[in-house]
Amino acid sequence: MHNSNGVASELMWRKSSFSGSTNDCIEVADGAHNVVAVRDSKDRQGPALTFTPSAWRAFVIGVQSGEFQLRR
């Protein structure tokens, strides 16, 4: 079964342990073949963004290194 954008709905979704019990975060599923899926935890039936594993890895490395710091 797939959702509206073709991502398998039976994927094992997870969210960061830093999220706590809130639903204001994203969930990631990396069990699909050659794709990492990302969705809004508040809209689990809604669309998911998909990335290649290398693109997702580059994004995570950028986040960890502070490349995307919020400017106020």
Image (tube, rainbow, N blue to C red):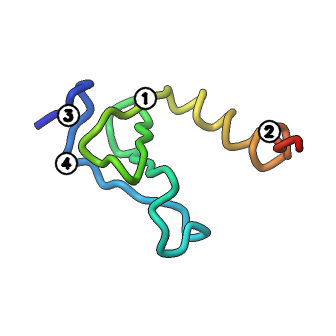
Q: In the image, 18: left or right of 26?
A: right
Residue underneath mark 1? 50
Residue in the picture at 52% in, 55% down: 25
Residue in the picture at 67% in, 43% down: 60
Residue in the picture at 37% in, 34% down: 48
**Which label sits on residue 68?**
2
- Pick the quarter of the image with the C terminus: top right
Query: Which residue type carries mark 1?
Result: Thr
Using the rendered view, name the quadrant where residue 6 is placed: top left
Residue in the picture at 80% in, 38% down: 68
Disc 1 versus disc 3: distance between alpha carbons?
A: 12 Å
* Earlier residue among tags 2 and 1: 1
Is disc 1 placed on a helix, strand or loop?
A: strand
- What count of labels does the image hold? 4
Residue underneath mark 4? 10
Contact flag, marks 1 and 3 (Cβ < 8 Å): no
**Image location (x, y in percent) of residue 41:** 40, 53
Disc 4 versus disc 1: distance between alpha carbons?
A: 15 Å
Q: In the image, 4: left or right of 34?
A: left
Using the rendered view, name the quadrant where residue 59 is placed: top right
Q: Nearer the viewer, mark 4 or mark 2?
A: 2
